[in-house]
Amino acid sequence: MLTSNGVEQDSLFGAIAYLIGEARTIAICAHTNPDGDALGSQLALKMIIERRWPNREVTCLLADDDPCPRIYEFMPGSDELVNASAYTKDPDLFISVDLSVASRLNHGEQVMRRAKSVAVIDHHPCKKPYGNVALIRPGAAAAGVIVAEFAEYLGVELTPGISQCLLCAIITDTGRFQYQNTDAESFVVASKLVAHGASPSEISLNVYQSFRLQFLHLKSLVMGRITTFEHGRLSYSYATIADIERTGASLDESDGLVDVVRSVAGSEVALFLKEVPGGKVRGNLRAKGHHDISTVARALGGGGHKAASGFTIEGSVDDALCAAMPLLKELFEKEDEERRDAS
């Protein structure tokens, strides 16, 4: 199995294992505004390292100053997460999970800069990753898939806790096995995790079936604002800070609202914009078909996958819409032209 630079995955697993073996203090950090894959993968990796190298001091960091999102608090180890801004050590090894762009580490970037060695485990395309060792496999459905295979490479037995974190990572990043990145490998790994004690029903209950009434009120506002462009091919909606304050919802709860926008019949691309503190807007993009929306996200300073990407820009919702719409229109026009040329 090859990574993005053509190197066998096992070769890079060996290099990462060597760095772990040489380290005494290890910090693991995922990206800012962490999702289920980011949190599940890093929590599982911590437990894997502790089982294989029991004398290591391993700390899982949150890139932001916010606490762990409520819907992910059920995962084992979530109560031990440390905000990166409060972590003062210079670790022997820093491992970034589910990202390979330093700027998306937020406060974790400073910890990374202080570390003696850096390793990256990611599944997002990246031409110039940082780190001494970078294992980047865009073909993996989730970072959790790679971490699960790392445990197998090390010969570490999967515990129910490790399995639960990794299954949450895979379920959330594949949209409950509904997104285009869902493949045979993700089902094979998920099956092994369930066999070792992971509970799909518990994950579903906590992540998808425990919405607070405040969030549902926010969701109704977002649904009422859904608008389509480009003859129905693009669906769009937004939420402001005022909406979140008025309904009593929290910022982290609104992360999944892009899927509501994505569900519009006939829509090929969905855009959801959300105001966040500091005069910024966070954009989520989702595609149903062949469209590569990561090009739009990268043009706006973000990144991600072909079918699921995001970005953050300074300004208002209107500013973000004005920046994104021409790029999305250009994307449709370019791909339509390519299809016509090919026919």
Image (spheres, rainbow, N blue to C red):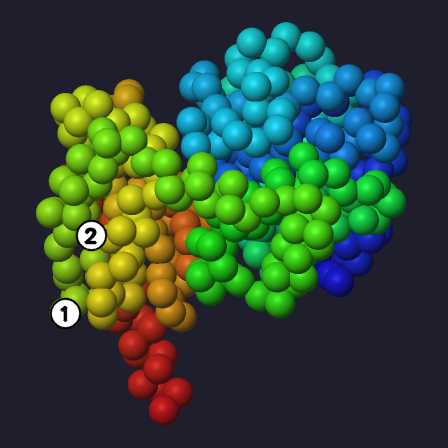
Residue type at mark 2 is Tyr
Q: Quadrant of the C terminus?
A: bottom left
**Percent x, y for residue 217?**
18, 35
Tell me if mark 1 has few (under 14), some (14-19) or many (20+) residues whose alpha carbon lies within 10 angstroms of its own. few
Left or right of 29, for residue 291: left
- Provide the secondary structure element on which disc 2 rests: strand
- Residue occupied by mark 1: 231
Query: Extreme bottom residue here?
Result: 343
Q: Secondary structure at mark 1?
A: loop
Q: Who's the residue at 82% across and 30% down the image?
A: 51
The residue sitting at 74% across, 38% down in the picture is 159
Point out which mark residue 236 bears.
2
Give the residue type that dot 1 points to.
Answer: His
- Image quarter where the N terminus lies is bottom right
> How far from the left and from the top, in percent, is residue 132?
75, 36
- Give the number of the disc on residue 11: none
Badge 2 or badge 1: first in the primary sequence = 1
Q: Is residue 94 depicted above or below 305 in this figure?
A: above
Residue at left 73%, top 30%? 47
Q: Are circles 2 and 1 on residues that touch, CB within 8 Å?
A: no
